Image: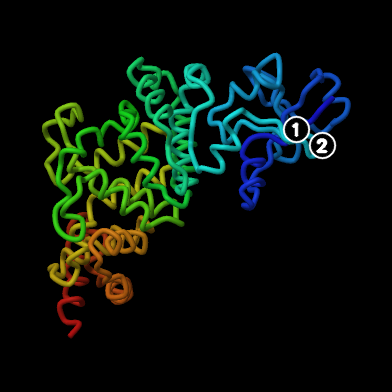
């Protein structure tokens, strides 16, 4: 039995970067002999044998030889193995691409075999922003999309890659590369027309909505929910006929519907569903917070408070519009939360809600 440190762990080792996850390739072994050597191993693979030992993955080969195994990997910078004696075995282009900071596919076939690698490639540019996608990678991604192979990927796998991208140093690169290679549809179809829509006011007046969105995502890097809100905040501007919204949805609500639909489509947690909708609904109003009427402030503050998105929303506004009123908003929230109805005004259904909103708005109107 030979066990090799594989893929990204070797890449990061050669780049002098911290190794986050260690994956191993097991050669010259059977299931039975591996389990005999590692009794605590739990088999989780379906297409081919994969075992977990203390959350560390040990995979059996998908090919007949080491060279074929390397060709079956996604990118050349990940197509490398390190044996127990420190000997490096890698794709012919690996070391050159590492030195030149290039993201190049190992082969067309590896992407055909698993189209998810389109999203993995985009995610690696988010993870390694100092690298440059090779023209061959762009061409293969476009080819995979043109063959409609992206439609066959399970939603859960798209969601997993997306969440990894959201936690990367340059999360905007994930959407940038998918857009550049024509791979937004069907999973991120809300953004397919954004390249032709101008972003609007300073500081991004000279960019399209999609690039503006990517810049906001990059500015929010370091917090998954904030980055997701950055991705969703202008999603309403991409409203097209193919969004297929029911006619009863007004324009103000369209962005909320699109954001929530996107999160659900790729099976993100409910926290993301809610946060994306709040980003689309409130970011423009929060950007001019001090100009809002007291009642609108109450609506904004209570909605963000109950959804636990107030801080993230105002971080988004700062990245989007370079304004930051979150301290004022927090102070106002602290003033209205203690407001209570008189006993005789309680339990009156919708009327009680209207009255409580009035009382809270009066507090904000009289704050001077």
- Residue 334 at least partly seen: yes
Identify the secondary structure beneath mark 2: loop
Identify the secondary structure beneath mark 1: strand
Question: Residue 39 at what x, y percent from top left?
Answer: 85, 30
Question: Residue 80 at what x, y percent from top left?
Answer: 65, 33
Return the residue nearer the eye: 149 or 99: 99
Disc 1 crowd rating (10 Å Cα; few below 14, some 14-19, many 20+) is many
Which quarter of the picture shows residue 126?
top left
367 w.r.t. 205: above or below: below
Disc 2 crowd rating (10 Å Cα; few below 14, some 14-19, many 20+) is few
Quadrant of image for the N terminus:
top right
- Residue 268 at least partly seen: no
Relative placement, left or right, of 32 versus 180 is right
Relative placement, left or right, of 8 versus 317 is right
Residue at image coords 63%, 19% = 46
> For residue 218, which numbered disc appears in the image?
none
Residue with the most extreme right position: 36
Disc 1 target residue: 4
Return the residue nearer the eye: 304 or 148: 148
Disc 2 target residue: 84
Residue at image coords 54%, 28% = 74
Return the residue nearer the eye: 302 or 187: 187
């Amino acid at each position: 039995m030979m066990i090799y440190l594989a893929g990204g762990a070797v890449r990061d080792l050669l780049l002098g970067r911290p190794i986050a996850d260690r994956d191993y390739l097991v050669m010259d072994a059977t299931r039975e002999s591996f389990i005999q050597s590692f009794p605590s191993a739990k088999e989780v693979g379906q297409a081919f044998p994969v075992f977990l030992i203390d959350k560390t993955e040990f995979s059996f080969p998908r090919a007949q030889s080491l060279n074929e195994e390397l060709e079956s990997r996604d990118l050349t910078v990940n197509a490398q193995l390190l044996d127990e004696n420190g000997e490096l075995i890698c794709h012919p282009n690996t070391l050159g691409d590492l030195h030149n900071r290039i993201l190049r596919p190992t082969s067309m076939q590896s992407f055909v075999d698993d189209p998810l690698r389109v999203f993995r490639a985009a995610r690696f540019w988010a993870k390694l922003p100092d690298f440059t996608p090779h023209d061959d990678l762009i061409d293969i991604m476009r080819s995979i999309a043109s063959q409609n192979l992206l439609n066959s990927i399970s939603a859960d796998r798209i969601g997993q890659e997306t969440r990894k991208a959201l936690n990367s140093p340059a999360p905007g690169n994930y959407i940038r590369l998918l857009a550049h290679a024509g791979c937004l549809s069907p999973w991120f179809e809300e953004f397919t027309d954004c390249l032709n829509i101008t972003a609007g006011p300073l500081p991004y007046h000279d960019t399209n909505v999609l690039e503006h969105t990517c810049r906001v995502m990059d500015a929010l890097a370091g917090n998954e929910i904030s980055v997701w809100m950055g991705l969703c905040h202008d999603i309403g501007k991409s409203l097209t006929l193919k969004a297929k919204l029911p006619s009863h949805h007004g324009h103000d609500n369209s962005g909320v519907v699109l954001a929530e639909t996107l999160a659900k489509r790729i099976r993100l947690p409910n926290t993301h569903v809610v946060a994306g909708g709040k980003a689309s609904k409130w970011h423009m109003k929060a950007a001019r917070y001090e100009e809002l009427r007291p009642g609108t402030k109450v609506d904004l503050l209570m909605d963000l408070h109950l959804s636990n998105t107030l801080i993230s929303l105002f971080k988004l506004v700062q990245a989007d519009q370079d304004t930051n009123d979150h301290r004022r908003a927090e102070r106002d929230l602290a003033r209205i939360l203690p407001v209570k109805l008189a006993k005789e005004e309680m339990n009156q259904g919708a009327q009680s809600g209207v009255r409580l909103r009035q009382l809270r708005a009066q507090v904000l109107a009289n704050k001077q």
